[in-house]
Every structure is written in C-alpha cells, then in structure tokens.
Amino acid sequence: MERWILLVSAEHAYQVLGPYASELDRLRALGRLNGNQSGNVLVLDVERGKYPAIRCVTTRGRSGMQNAHTKSSAAISPDTRIDELHLKPKALGIFLDNGLKTLRDLAALPEAELWAQHGIGQVTVEKLRSILHSAGLRFAPPPDPVARLHWENRQRRAEVLKPAATVPGDAAISALGLLPAALTAVTRRGLKTVSDLVSYTPRELSGVMSRRAVRDTIERLTLFGRSLQPETPRRPNGFGLIERSEYLDSLSVRTPVKELRPLLGKRATSALRAAGFEAAGDILSRSLPERLSERDRARVDRFALELRTSLETRRA
C-alpha cells in the first residue's frame, strides 16, 4: 500500500505528492507543504488493484499551512498534542472531550476502549498505533487477566521474528507469541508457564489443539531454543509385534483419546470424543457416556484398569 497527498489549490490545478512509506512520513509531508498555497488537501491510500481510499480531507488556508509547518518541524514525541495529528474531527472531539491532550495520555488507554467508541474505526486505530510506535509508546494492556494474556502474546508474536534468546521455564506462555487458538487451548488445560508446555509431547499436544497450532507451537519453541518432549515411536498396525503391556507403558494421562483407537475400537473412541473426552486421563476421572454399548463399555473399563495399573507401577 502507498500513501499519497493530493493538493487541489488555486495556484495549481492539482499537485500529487508521494508516495510515503509510513503514516509518519505523510504527516511530516503535510507540514512541509508551501504555506502560500491554499486549498483542499486529500490524503489518499493507494493499493494495487483497488480504488484509492480517501482517509482524510482538510481545508487549509495560508496561516493554517504555516502552523502545520511549525508543528511538524518538531519530531513526534510522547508530549505531542493529539490535535496536531490531523485526525478525523469526530475522533478528535472524542479525545478532547475525555481530557486526552497528548500521546502520553492516549497511551494510558487500552486499545479495546478505542474500539468501543462510536466514531473511532479501524483506520483511526491503526493510524494511532503507528504514531504511538514512532513516539516509543504503545497502548496500555487490558485490565482483564485473560485479555491481558492474549494482548501480551500478540505483542510478543509481532516483535520476535528471528531466533531469540532462550526463554526461561518459569516465563508465562504468552512470552512465546503462540497462535491465539493455541494460547486459548493450552490455558484452558491449565498450562501457565513454558515448563508446563514443554512437558508435553507433540502427540499429546495434538489432543489439545489443531495440527496447524501444534506445528506453529513447535516453531515458536524452536525460535526460543526450547522443544517438546521426544515422541514415542509409532507402532504400525496397532501394537505391531510388541506386547499390549509395553504399549500401555508408552501412554500417559495426556495421550489424546483419538490415539487410543487400537485399544478401544472405533465406536468407543468416537463416542468418547463426542462426549468431550480429550485425553486418557478423562477416562480415569469421569463417568463414561451412556451411549456406550455394553461391549464397548467393558473394553473401556478394561483399558482404564490397565492404564491405572501401568501408571502406578511406573510411579513406584
């Protein structure tokens, strides 16, 4: 996307200025316009294959252009006044009515509060986010703990784009910058720190989130020098040539129910998953669904007894 300025004045039929790489460059260019020119200034966004979008239309006289030149001569800073940013009148009125005068005041607000205001849309929020970043600021995190966790995760995902320093095990999961769906899935399972996450194997994690989320999680962990637990080799055709007890010893309470099909059968596995059973531990701690047939219920009960015995033996 390219940002342009179109000046329609009495001196010139029109004058095209641009393109500009960022919103800040365009703001500075507006201030550098000749103060002797008066007319309409149209601020445009031009994207290939789409019609130009007019984001702001202002009318400036001779004195107005001189003031703009004076204001833009100073660099954007936390103390820059909001009324110098060429915002839409409605958005500017909302800020001034709420006592917000500088970028520092604006940065004290969570971004969600701006979205809740009628008259402030995506264009204005993105413009303010870019300006705050240029001033070394950003919007405040939301007060709600869950929303704050996702906010920190988004910030981390946007910041780290290349291999970074190893993240400590006691760091919050939001330090990894996971996909939103992956972060929701692991927090729903009660995982809070990086150590909690890396105690899982890829197969166990696939019972919690989608395959795409698992792949992205592995990539993010690699970015920070961490990894999941090594996977137990898969056995072809169910158990292959190994004993049933050896196969049970490779399972844990976090093994996804869909991986238990060689032991439970197709119908029982489908019934358990439909009832919300996600991992083998759910079979040990929850009542079985009524839709299970007597034969399938007997297989599940046998599996639960064998898995509990296997876990106790391994603990001992």
Image (spheres, rainbow, N blue to C red):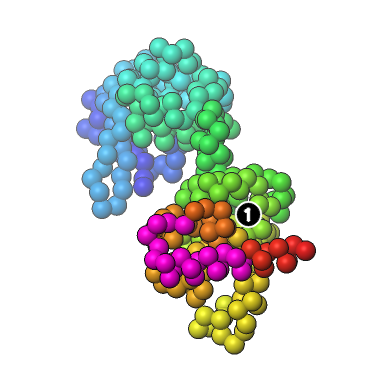
Query: What type is the residue that disc 1 sits on?
Result: Leu
Instruction: Please identify the residue farthest to the front as the structure is shown.
Output: 294
* Residue lying at 66% horizontally and 66% vertically, measured from the top left: 309
Seen as rendered, the residue at the extreme bottom is 241
Q: Establish if 52 lies above or below 119.
A: below
Q: Residue at x 39, y 69 (%)?
A: 267
Q: Main secondary structure of the magenta part?
A: helix
* Residue drawn 48% across the image and 15% down it: 101
Task: Answer with the quarter of the image where residue 33 lies.
Answer: top left
> Is disc 1 placed on a helix, strand or loop?
helix
Relative to 104, residue 308 above or below: below
Which quarter of the figure has residue 226? Answer: bottom right
Residue visible at 27% across and 35% down?
54
Q: Can residue 184 be seen in this view?
A: yes
Compare residues 47 and 294 and report the one nearer the observer.
294
Q: Quadrant of the C terminus?
A: bottom right
Q: In which quarter of the image is residue 156?
A: top right
Q: Mark 1 points at which residue?
A: 197
Q: In this view, does 292 lie above or below 95?
A: below
In the figure, is residue 179 to the left or right of 63? right
Closer to the camera, 9 or 252?
252
Residue 262: x percent and y percent? 50, 76
On the picture, is 260 further left or further right than 3? Answer: right
Viewer can see residue 219: no
Q: In this view, does 97 lie above or below 23?
A: above
Magenta-span inclusion, residue 116: no
Numbered marks: total: 1
Q: Mark 1 packing: few (<14 Cα in 10 Å), some, or many (20+)?
A: many
The question of residue 302 being in magenta is answered with: yes
Residue 270 picture location, percent across and down: 40, 65
Q: Give the range drawn in magenta.
A: 288-307
Q: Taking 163 as reference, is 289 left or right?
A: left
